[in-house]
Image: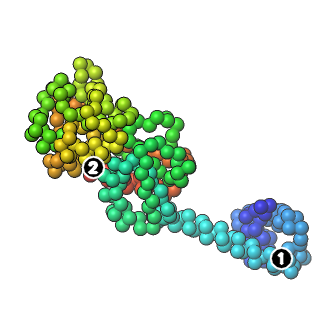
């Protein structure tokens, strides 16, 4: 587009005020600046919009026709600006959120009702994926990831942390006894991940080392599957508080080897595509989640 909004404003202001001088005062510009803007506009359109006399300015037929379009364009821009300002005050629009399935189920879903009540103009789309995703390819506004971020250049916001604990069900401990040392742990049924191996490093003091590498008796690819197995009494598991806080509170899972367990906390990060100012709907979602997960779930 060759025509600029500045030129359109100069043109409509001159018509409305009746003179270049009045238009300049109205727009806070010089008369020469307004005159040059009109000249550029007429040159770009290759037509005369205003006939200039010593006493007044008079619209040509082409000028009258173009004035209608100029007003429509300016009104459209003003409306767009008003809508953006309104969105900052009242966040609105579609918000696509991606998270690992356990975090979505145990943390995000319980917060949805309160968030929707607070921000009724935001339309949520919730997707789960346990792998690192391409935000653009998946058309995702914000993704929530648990654990250290591999890419240090990614745009991220730390929402909180969640502690790792060694847990078992009371039924399992009643049947097989509670291990009192790490060596005793080796003789128990240990529930671990199929991959990656780092998830099978438990935060236990092991001869001055800060982890204990287990060989799973029963493996699964999902933390939620391991949680369900632990609840069924199938073994001992290492899981984060965000998944098991309610289970611990209600006695379905109990912590073991508490004295030997190191205070290891997994970071919870929200990652997003651009590093410019975030849209209001993204910011208010992250603020809401950050405030509530630390209060209720971690």
Q: Where is residue 56 in the image (x, y as percent from the top left)?
A: 85, 78
Q: Which residue is drawn at 18% across and 28% down?
A: 187
Q: How crowded is mark 2: few (under 14 residues within 10 Å), some or many (20 or more)?
A: some
In the image shown, does 33 or 293 lie closer to the viewer? Answer: 293
Q: Residue at x 47, y 42 (%)?
A: 132
28 on left or right of 133: right
Q: Can residue 25 be seen in this view?
A: no
Q: Distance between the residues labelled 2 and 1?
A: 65 Å
Q: Nearer the viewer, mark 2 or mark 1?
A: 2
- Judging by the rendered image, the residue that carries numbered circle 2 is 297
Q: Tell me the SS state at disc 2.
A: loop
Q: Which residue is drawn at 24% across and 44% down?
A: 229
User: Can you tell which quarter of the image residue 3 is in?
Assistant: bottom right
In the image shown, does 253 or 61 lie closer to the viewer? Answer: 253
Q: Position of residue 134 (x, y in %)?
A: 53, 45
Is 276 situated above or below 80? above
User: Can you tell which quarter of the image residue 226 is in?
Assistant: top left
237 on left or right of 35: left
Q: Residue at x 78, y 76 (%)?
A: 67
68 on left or right of 175: right
Q: Residues within 10 Å of mark 1 (few under 14, many from 20)?
A: some
Is 167 situated above or below 212? below
- Judging by the rendered image, the residue that carries numbered circle 1 is 63
276 on left or right of 269: right
């Amino acid at each position: 587009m060759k025509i600029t909004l500045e030129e359109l404003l100069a043109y409509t202001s001159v018509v409305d005020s009746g003179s270049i001088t009045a238009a300049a005062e109205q727009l806070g510009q010089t008369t020469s600046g307004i005159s040059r803007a009109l000249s550029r506009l007429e040159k770009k359109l290759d037509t005369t919009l205003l006939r200039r006399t010593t006493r007044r300015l008079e619209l040509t037929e082409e000028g009258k026709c173009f004035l209608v379009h100029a007003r429509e364009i300016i009104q459209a821009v003003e409306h767009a600006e008003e809508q953006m300002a309104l969105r900052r005050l009242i966040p609105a629009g579609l918000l696509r959120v991606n998270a690992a399935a356990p975090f979505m189920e145990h943390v995000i879903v319980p917060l949805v009702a309160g968030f929707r009540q607070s921000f009724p103009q935001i339309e949520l789309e919730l997707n789960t994926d346990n792998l690192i995703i391409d935000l653009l390819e998946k058309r995702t506004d914000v993704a929530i990831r648990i654990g250290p971020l591999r890419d240090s250049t990614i745009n991220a916001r730390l929402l909180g942390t969640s502690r790792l604990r060694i847990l078992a069900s009371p039924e399992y401990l009643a049947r097989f006894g509670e291990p009192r040392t790490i060596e005793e742990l080796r003789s128990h049924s240990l529930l671990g991940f199929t991959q990656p191996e780092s998830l099978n490093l438990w935060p236990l003091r092991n001869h001055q080392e800060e982890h204990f590498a287990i060989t799973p008796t029963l493996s699964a690819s999902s933390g939620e599957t391991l949680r369900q197995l632990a609840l069924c009494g199938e073994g001992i598991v290492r899981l984060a508080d965000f998944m098991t806080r309610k289970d611990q509170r209600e006695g379905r899972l109990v912590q073991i080897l508490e004295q030997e367990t190191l205070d290891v906390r997994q970071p919870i990060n929200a990652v997003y595509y651009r590093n410019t100012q975030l849209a209001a709907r993204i910011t208010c979602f992250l603020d809401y989640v950050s405030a509530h997960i630390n209060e209720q779930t971690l």
